Amino acid sequence: MVMKVLVVGGGGREHAITRALSCNSDVRIFSVMARKNPGIARIAEQVLIERETNVPEIVRFATRNTLDTAVIGPEAPLEAGIVDHLEAAGIPCVGPTRAAARIETDKAYCRQLMERHGIAGCPEYRVCHDPEEARKFIEAYDGDLAIKPIGLTGGKGVRIMGEHVDVAGAIEYVRQIGGDVVLEERLLGAEFTLQAFVDGKRLVPMPLVQDHKRAYEGGVGPNTGGMGSYSLPDHMLPFVSRSDYREALGIMEGTVAAMQSEGVPYRGILYGQFMNTHEGPRVIEFNARFGDPEAMNVLSILESDFSRIVTGITQGDLASSDVRFAPKATVCKYLAPEGYPDAPVAHQPLTISDYGDALLYYANVEERDGTLRTLASRTLAFVGMGETLEEAEAIAEKAASAVSGRIFHRRDIGTRDSLEGWRHSHMKEIT
Ligand code: AMP
Ligand code: GLY
């Protein structure tokens, strides 16, 4: 049966969503994006170039084309209430309502929900609405804190004491952002991502992924949206034990149950970012969507029909038997313009030569008169898949090296060196 699906968003993540949906030839894709993503445009039957938060215009596009369902990629349209409005127009969505998206868009809500329901994995925290109150808390607190603006910041709003700022710098930062902050115990350990499909009640997990947020090799330099990520054939990570994994999954299940019990059921993709501390996994944050790049790792090895999963989520009858991933390793490498993230050189031409067996996902790039050019953010991503991490890494690396232009990527992502080195520095930190 033909299914007409709206995909909202135009980045690498949404290209991966679109590609996965289009594996079923009965799926017809309708895309809304702020700027034309050439990868998505090639698959979609129709494209609306529009701000992804222009909800009325998107609802009109969806109803005019009698679309059956929608998958929302980024967080901004969720916060703008796109799901509430599409569903009011009779179009069920993979993505939470505005109220349920607060799990990502309102960090105070997230922590208070966890506390109300006694959900494990919540760091010590304090919500402040006033710079003076925050100053007193920071000065009195014994240890380092993470300072987070309450609302969305595009992944760039967190300052960590002992890493980015000292006590005075922390107080100054709170003043700068006006006082609405969550102050959290600084967590030490190794970060991992657990994403899950959620139908309101049930949660079906995807393979674990580790993202690399720092811009440069060896894990140094400024934080970015994510320079690349990997996953392993057993869908676990070397530094996450079975019991850590069960704990993390339990935290996510507890959160979904808590939301249901409060009358704000969660439907869509739930993304848990965890710090695996020596006391077990702690929640760094929840996102109300797929991760970017993490979506590219998991969707590239999804064996089951994504459109069936979409239906399971929207109808509230998702079964774990609907979701199967290939037992393969994946390595995703993002190419970014030189100077990214602080001073990216945009509008530079790119040439892609033979990129072998990798999957290519387009992100923030423009194609004009047959020429690809960089923009200000992450440009293209390659995903290598293999029986082993080494194999997947070699495929991704070969592909990333086949692009010429004023761009760079991290050659170390997915290499054993980076894993060992990384684990080593992490061990030093927590012991
Ligand atoms: P976020 O914007 O919440 O994804 O945070 C960005 C990065 O800040 C995370 O990837 C972590 O590395 C770091 N971070 C956030 N919260 C904490 C915390 N409580 N302790 C230590 N690091 C944190
Ligand atoms: N990779 C981190 C994020 O999507 O928020």
Image (tube, rainbow, N blue to C red):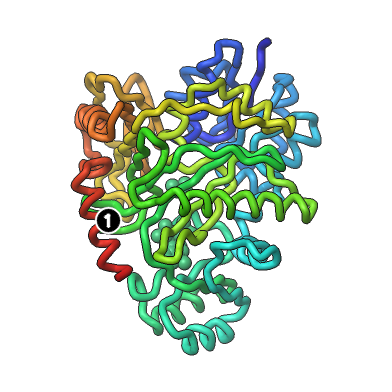
Ligand 1 within 8 angstroms of badge 1 C-beta: no
Residue in view at x 55 percent, y 15 percent? 24
Q: Is residue 132 visible?
A: yes
359 on left or right of 325: left
Q: Quadrant of the N terminus?
A: top right
The picture places residue 247, in percent across and down from the top left corner, at 53, 54
The picture places residue 168, in percent across and down from the top left corner, at 40, 84
The picture places residue 77, in percent across and down from the top left corner, at 62, 43
The image quarter containing residue 322 is top right
Residue 88 to residue 181: above or below: above
Residue 384 to residue 253: above or below: above
Count of picture labels? 1
Q: Quadrant of the C terminus?
A: bottom left
77 on left or right of 403: right
Q: Is residue 51 visible?
A: no
Circle 1 Cα neighbour tier, 10 Å, few/some/many (<14 / 14–19 / ≥20): some
Residue in view at x 71 percent, y 42 percent? 201
Q: Which residue is identified by label 1?
A: 423
The picture places residue 210, in percent across and down from the top left corner, at 38, 46
Residue at disc 1, secondary structure: helix
Between 72 and 339, the residue placed more toward the observer is 72
Residue in view at x 67 percent, y 47 percent? 80
From this viewpoint, which residue is outermost toward the front? 243
Residue 113 to residue 410: above or below: below
> Which of the four quarters of the rendered structure image does ligand 1 lie in?
bottom left
45 on left or right of 368: right
Between 104 and 319, the residue placed more toward the observer is 319
The image quarter containing residue 356 is top left
Between 145 and 322, the residue placed more toward the observer is 322
Which amino acid type is shown beneath numbered disc 1? Arg
